[in-house]
Amino acid sequence: MALQILKKNGTFELWGNLSTRTSRSFITHLEYLINTLKGVIIDIDKIKAIETSGIEALKILIGISLKKNSILSINGKGCKHIYAHNSKIFAA
């Protein structure tokens, strides 16, 4: 399943899979948003599956937002293993 990014009430909802196939375009799109908006909120509740490359994509985007002094907020309880394996990164 492809990854869809839908804007709803100022939040970008992720639908589908964050995989090797979708990670590069996800990074490109979110980097554009980080560079053009004051803050970006993404909701991961609708993520069905995430591969290691998807977790790496989130890490890259966190790094980009920190370098740009921008706000990137990742909300939702989807894919709980994201938090279990990366709790230190998401606490930053």
Image (spheres, grey):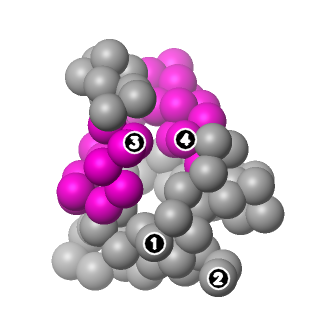
State if disc 2 and disc 1 touch (CB < 8 Å). yes
The secondary structure type at the circle numbered 2 is: loop
Instruction: Tell me which numbered mark, 4 or 1, is placed earlier along the sequence.
Output: 1
Q: Which mark is residue 55?
A: 4
Q: Which residue is mark 1?
A: 48
Query: In terms of depth relative to the viewer, which is nearer, 41 or 4?
Result: 4
Q: Residues within 10 Å of mark 2 (few under 14, many from 20)?
A: few
How many numbered marks have been drawn onto this rendered protein structure?
4
User: Does 51 appear above or below 13?
Assistant: above
Looking at the picture, how far across and down is residue 42, in whole percent? 35, 58
Query: In terms of depth relative to the viewer, which is nearer, 79 or 67?
Result: 79
Looking at the picture, how far across and down is residue 53, in whole percent? 68, 44
The secondary structure type at the circle numbered 3 is: helix
Q: Does the magenta segment cover residue 67?
A: yes
Q: Which residue is mark 2?
A: 1
**Left or right for 12, reference 60:** left
Q: Amino acid at mark 3?
A: Ile
